[in-house]
Amino acid sequence: MNSRTTEVVSRVVDVDGIPMSALLCEAREPRAVLVALHGGAVTSRYFDYPDHPRLSLLRTAAALGFTTVAIDRPGYGSSAPFGESMASPARRVDLAYGVVDRLLASRPRGAGLFLWAHSIGCALGVLMAGDDRRSDLLGLEIAGTGRHHAPGAVEILDFRQRDPAVPRRSGPGLRDLLWEPSRLYPAEVVGAARIQSPGPPYEATVARRWPLEFAEVAARVRIPVHYTLGDQERVWSSGPEAMADIAGLFTASPRVVTDEQADSGHNLSIGRTATGYHLKILSFVEECVLGRENDGIDRLPRRAG
């Protein structure tokens, strides 16, 4: 294997007058580029938690030949002051792809882009995956999301009873949903204090509507899909029937794989099993790359025998 850098750098690029921030970790000759989309109330550092390099998706991916762009989703990071202007889902898709394209510019992309989304970031990830303007998409990983909440979760999340413009980010019940069992995480990671961030106003509306809109958006996706839930997930319904339900939504996808990650809670990428989870999905990414390469070979003109 060629030596590759595992340096993670912060970058800010202008997208239609809005400063969009992201983390970048480059492989020298990338097999592909991962576009990582964090969940709610945290920043892109979810994928590179401070002082825990072994948990880092960016560093693990670079060591295996994949460049990663972990964006601060619209309304987070440097774009937080502009959150009021991001109510349109199409606008958020354009901003997300804009930061990726401007940040990569002439940098090598390998076989294309693989989208990797967590929790409420999956709403943006599935929308991006279904954008038929892109011809460079390899596949999609969604984790920590679903269509039906686990028993008791709706009452704690309280979407129907609160003002959708005022997201609720704290409280013991919510903490239990997101961070229990706490033994699944390094002690200093529980609560993600070092990467917390207020969410944009639109996000409470997305959280309330997503279970209702998931099926319609998923049906537009025409690339391979991988879906992961931790076996200790408490926000979303889990088990074989729930996993099969989500897989069945991607009716236009050529391949859908579901997996229950052992010894994992909601926050898969910063739990103790994060490295195992990342390696599993990177294997799926590699399969998507080979599928794209083999498709190119199959399209070459055959020499007459």
Image: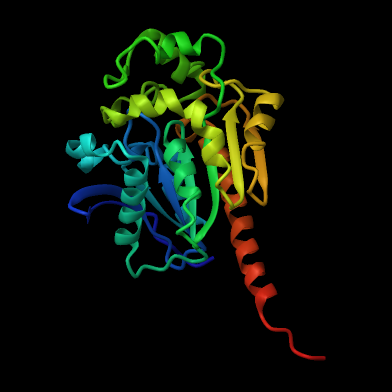
- Which residue is depicted at the point 50% across and 49% down? 130
Which quarter of the picture shows residue 108?
Answer: bottom left
Across and down, in percent, residue 134 comes to 46, 59
Q: Is residue 65 visible to the viewer in this orientation of the structure?
A: no
Above or below — where is 43 with respect to 169? below
Q: Is residue 145 visible to the viewer in this orientation of the structure?
A: yes
Left/right placement of residue 305 relative to residue 60 reads right
Across and down, in percent, residue 62 comes to 45, 55
Left/right placement of residue 246 relative to residue 25 reads right
- Which residue is depicted at the point 65% across and 37% down? 247
Nearest to the observer: residue 165 or residue 239: 165
Left/right placement of residue 270 relative to residue 98 reads right
Above or below — where is 78 with respect to 202? below
Across and down, in percent, residue 84 comes to 21, 34
Nearest to the observer: residue 206 or residue 51: 206
Give the position of the C terminus as an image quadrant: bottom right
- Which residue is depicted at the point 59% across and 52% down? 222
